[in-house]
Amino acid sequence: MQKLTLLTLASAKTLSYFEPCFQDYHIHQCHSLDSMKSFLRKTASGLILAEFPKCTSRHVEAFMALRSEMIMKNSHLNLMFFSQSIDFSVYQKFPRDRSLLLVSEAEKQKAPMLASKFLQGQPVFLRNSERQPMESPVLVKSTDWTGQLSTPRTKGRFIDFAQQGARLYLPQKIFKVKDYISVLYQSSNKDWITVECQLRWEHPTPDGGQMLGIQFLAIA
């Protein structure tokens, strides 16, 4: 069986986290984007592994654009990104992309298992993930699916987030469990993002506010 191609812009240490999964790959260490582009021009199918201190949606968008621009027609190229931290917006913009695997530093012990499932075509986007602190302001409003009501936005802030949901604080008690809400926030790239969510739990805070546990449904 012909080996696939792995193009890596990651350190040897990062590569070692995934290496058991790459036995069927020809590994090419690329020292720049230009050298990667030269390989992409002749790559029929394979994988890119890249490493960032912090992965943002713009990193993902740039590599997806590069893949579309450079690879040959009818070819298939997956993307794997390893990062010390992953921006909240990445999980929102690319929630169910089967050609993309995101692995954070906190998940490095699970990297071989995640990569193996990913390379076999199994979904890995529904896995539980570590909660990450996120002190960021948000605007929250009730989502009226009938479109008959217009509700004002309420200021609040994120407490932390994971891939499938987040915790929010609001200075006043407004929502109840199972409510659908819309959350507007600004990513680290200064992009404004709206996420449709459902309230899974809530409890009052001593200052008269409300802590919310939300599940992400879709990005608007």
Image (cartoon, rainbow, N blue to C red):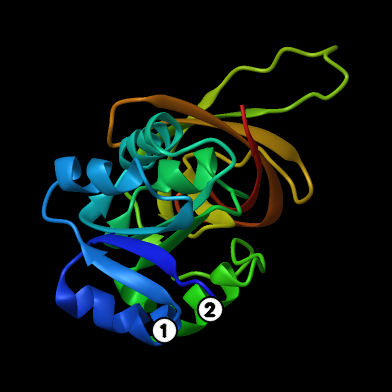
User: Quadrant where the C terminus lies?
Assistant: top right
Kindly tell me whether residue 95 is visible in this rendering: yes
Q: Is residue 191 left or right of residue 216?
A: left
Disc count in the image? 2
Q: Quadrant of the N terminus?
A: bottom right
Q: Position of residue 54 (x, y in %)?
A: 24, 52
Q: Residue at x 45, y 37 (%)?
A: 156
Secondary element at tag 2: helix
* Relative depth, front residue between 30 and 112: 30
Amino acid at circle 1: Gln
Q: Which mark is residue 163?
A: none
Residue 3 position in % (x across, y down): 46, 72
Label 2: few (<14), some (14–19) or many (≥20) C-alpha neighbours in 10 Å: some
Q: Earlier in the sequence, mark 2 or mark 1?
A: 1
112 or 149, which is in the foreground?
Answer: 112
The mark lying in front, picked from 2 and 1, is: 1
Query: Which residue is the site of mark 2?
Result: 116
Between 73 and 157, the one lying in front of the other is 73
Which amino acid lies under the numbered mark 2 shown in the image of this protein?
A: Ser
Residue ID for mark 1: 23
Q: Position of residue 72 (x, y in %)?
A: 47, 38
Mark-to-mark CA distance, 2 and 1: 11 Å
At mark 1, the secondary structure is loop
Query: Horizontal placement of 105 versus 185: left or right?
Result: left
Please say whether residue 131 is visible from this viewpoint.
Answer: no
The location of residue 202, given as percent across then percent down, is 64, 56
Asked if the residue at tag 1 contacts the one at tag 2, i.e. Cβ–Cβ closer than 8 Å, the answer is no
Residue occupying the far left of the picture: 31
Q: Residue furthest front?
A: 1
Q: Which residue does the image show at 34% across and 75% down from the upper left?
A: 106
Look at 79% across and 48% down and name the residue there.
178
